[in-house]
Amino acid sequence: MILSASRRCDIPAFFGEWFLNRLKEGFVCVRNPYNRHSVSKIMLDPQTVDCIVFWTKNAAPFLQFLPQIDELGYRYYFQFTVTPYGREIERNIGDKARILQAFRTLSEKIGKERVVWRYDPILLADGITADRHIERFRAMCKELKGYTETVVISFLDEYQKLDKTKYRAPDEKEMLEIGHVLAEIARDNGLSIQTCAEKISIPGIEKGACIDKTLIERICNYPISVKKDASQRGECLCAESIDIGEYDTCAHFCEYCYANHRKASIERRMAAHDKASPLLIGNPEPTDSIRLRKTYSLRCLC
């Protein structure tokens, strides 16, 4: 089993103690996002969990928990997003210099192969031009050179909640032009560069998988047998995983995020978080139907 923590919210930034408690107790409960009283119970034996993929924009609060996670025997890597945007877009993300330092510290602790840099989404807006992206990407590459092996880029998806009067995705010509330059900069800094779930093919950039079978096999030091995740978009090449996050639970308040909507709802739900609960938000209710989800190691014994 591959555990995703989480595409839906930033568990390392906001829920680290809860996550460690789940590992210690050996299980987690996850509500169905389309039927909240349908709850899956997922066992978290380190012999069953082949790898954990953490998604974060700020790993600093989580660093304190890594030694205990290591002692428990779990294997993991990080998808760590660092963008050029300020608080006008990423409303509640701290100073980027500190975020970059947290990235470097994490890399020093666990190894550069286990910290993947995400530069996404690439959007255009007033004051955020293609040239600005190229300038900031070049500067960030210098900051992170030697601290990661891979950078993943993607372009803005214009979800319904997005304010299209302020932000837009690059058109195909702009994607090709931006991608071409970013690929050259990445190579100059010793980085492999990939796209995430993009239809467009950009010369010099591979189409990548964020839940990456090859990287997981490298971290686990054994082969795994896993299917492509059919629950994701067709362009997504990720391996199948189980996500334990919930929507509307991320206090970064990024303008472009698909997983969060109204600020008041996010604050209300996060206030219901209980670090001792098996659920990320709230506690089990009498009307919940809790079913044990069948899980197994993906280790290939052939």
Image (cartoon, rainbow, N blue to C red):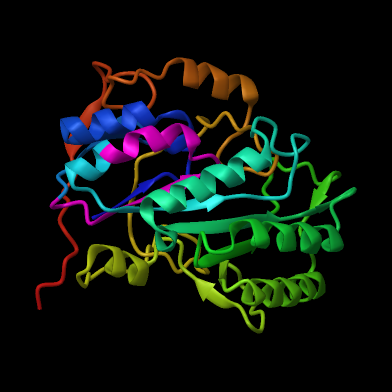
Q: Position of residue 118 (x, y in %)?
A: 57, 57
| Residue in view at x 80 percent, y 48 percent | 167
| In the displayed structure image, the side of residue 156 where residue 47 appears, left or right | left
In the image, taking residue 3 as reference, residue 248 lies left or right, namely right
Q: Quadrant of the C terminus?
A: bottom left
Question: Is residue 22 part of the magenta span, yes or no?
Answer: no
Range covered by the magenta-colored residues: 47-67
- Give the image quarter of residue 293: top left
Q: Position of residue 272 (x, y in %)?
A: 43, 16
Q: Residue furthest bottom?
A: 203
Point out the residue furthest to the right here. 126
Please say whether residue 273 is visible from this viewpoint: yes
User: Is 241 on the left-hand or right-hand side of 255?
Assistant: left
Give the image location of residue 123, x and y in percent: 75, 55
The residue at 39%/49% (across/down) is: 109
Q: Quadrant of the N terminus?
A: bottom left
The x and y percentages for residue 135 are 80, 61
Instruction: Specify whether residue 246 is in view.
Output: no
Q: Residue at the location (66% across, 84% down)? A: 203
The reply, left or right, for residue 187 in relation to residue 302 is right
Q: Residue at x 62, y 43 (%)?
A: 257
> Looking at this view, is 41 or 75 the one in front?
75
Out of 283 and 224, give the one closest to the viewer: 224
Residue 285's place in the image compared with 70, above or below, is above
Is the residue 4 above or below the residue 155 in the image?
above
54 magenta-colored: yes
Q: How many marks?
A: 0
